[in-house]
Image (cartoon, helix red, strand yellow):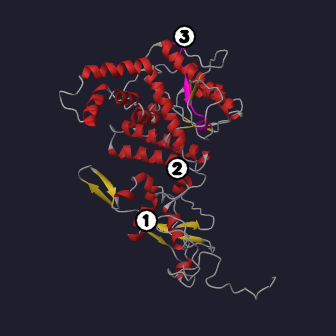
Amino acid sequence: MKDVARDWAAQGLRPLRVWHGLMRRFNLDDAATPPLVTVQRLVHNYVVGTLVGSDLLKSVRLKIRDAGYSGHEKDSSAFTFSWRNDTERRPIIGNGTDQDPFVVGITTKKLLQMPTAILGLSSGISMRQTQEQYTEVLSSLRRVYQLVTGKDMCVQYAMGDADLAQWAALQDAFSINSAFRFLMCFFHVAKKVYEKTRCLDSSVAAMVLRHLHELHFTSTETEFNKKLAEVKAEWSNWVQLVGFRAYIEKVWLNEKTFIAAIKRDVTMRRRFKVGTLVDQLMILCGGESVRAKPIATTTTFSDRLARRAKALTRDGLLYEKVFQRGRITSLLADAPSRTTTNSIRVMALPATRVFDVLERRSRENLPATAQLNSETARMDRLDMPPCGWEVDTEARTCPCRFNMKHGSCVHLLFALGAVGSIDATGRETLFYRGTNKRKRAQARTQPAGRPRANGHALHME
């Protein structure tokens, strides 16, 4: 029974949950169940004495030093590192003051070899995040990357908050050999903008969100700067947006979804002792190394996008625009002047919106798994020509803004399904060589049936 209690304590369960688990595990009654005080004492002594799960500086330093990087670790074995090392190249940590900060990193060899590095800074530990602390953290990460991989760490993109300390630390640590771009998470931007526009009129708030999506879906930096100037000029005409515009220029975001995942999966939204937290984070790094998925190099059609294309096609909102050259419509200005055998004109119409009384907002009249918010769905049709989007089925490209941002769209999914390259769920299929049942011009250069230019056997031409 003690071994089971110690095992559960090592997994981070509280003494009360361990006590309840022992009752269910061994089917104990009130007389045979040990007192809760006994279980609490057992768990506390095991965590503090054996697992070194305490805030004692000597114990924490010894644990971090023993788990320091030595070069003999396996690919999925977690180790600790820091900027300051002793003569044996073991990490040295401070006591947590401003003069001697507590800075330590935990990772694995496999995580360092991935092209994406997530650096989580917990606000519960680092109360004052200054430029010196950021620089020390990033510099230690760069050095351990060079020790493990034998290569210098070159950063191409960096995503974080619009914080001067973060920006300056990135410049100090990686500006020597990296011309990186500083990015921000669009979800956090939209979330913060939505919160700040709740006090405005509904029409003004909708205009701000519409401008935000148009900025996000711009194709080039030049277009973004031009659109940003137009948005600022439009906002200056509204008295309600004076304070909001000042907030946008000064304050930005500070939430981190990676920290939320740690609180959910590792700490279970509890405040652990530093010694216990180090153990849990090492387990997290080892688990992420084992279950890490390979980085995708090509875009795929998501399930939501496939369901949305199917629903729009069924309702007649997504269809092919066919121009017959023998009619007067082919002479109109909105008809395409040139068509290729690998292109399809796809028309997209907006879905009908239905007002939800309970949630007090309108939604698309589509299945819940195929719905998008109004501004994201508008990007499918923004600046669409009257003759529809010209989708290239061979190059798999579409000029719409949604495809430019995500690498896939409902127009491309519909066009590839029309020529028989994919099925309704977006999966690749064998090429269809028969007559097109949709009675449209063949979208491929390969004719149906046996090739006409085929000669006899052993024919060399």
Start-end of magenta stretch: 94-111
> Which label number is shown at residue 217?
2
Residue type highlighted by circle 2: Phe
Residue type highlighted by circle 3: Gln
Q: Residues within 10 Å of mark 3 (few under 14, many from 20)?
A: few
Residue located beneath label 3 in the image? 99
In the picture provided, is 338 more to the left or to the right than 309? right
Q: Quadrant of the C terminus?
A: bottom right
Q: Quadrant of the N terminus?
A: top left
Camera-near label (1 vs 3) is: 3
Q: Residue at x 33, y 45 (%)?
A: 202
Image height check: is 314 above or below 306?
A: below
Q: Residues within 10 Å of mark 2 (few under 14, many from 20)?
A: some
Q: From this viewpoint, is residue 249 visible?
A: no
x and y, in percent, of residue 259 in the image = 45, 33
Mark 1 or mark 2: which comes first in sequence? 2
Residue type highlighted by circle 1: Leu
x and y, in percent, of residue 57 in the image = 49, 13
x and y, in percent, of residue 61 in the image = 53, 16
Image height check: is 29 above or below 99?
A: below
Q: Rounded to the nearest whole Å, what is the CA distance between mark 1 and mark 3?
A: 62 Å
**Quick check: marks 1 and 3 in contact, CB under 8 Å?**
no
Q: Nearer the viewer, residue 300 or 308?
A: 300
Q: Secondary structure at mark 3?
A: loop
> Which label number is shown at residue 156?
none
Which residue extends farthest bottom? 456
Residue located beneath label 1 in the image? 349
Q: Nearer the viewer, residue 2 or 138?
A: 2
Q: Rounded to the nearest whole Å, what is the CA distance between mark 1 and mark 2?
A: 19 Å
Q: Is residue 103 magenta?
A: yes
Q: From this viewpoint, is residue 71 visible?
A: yes
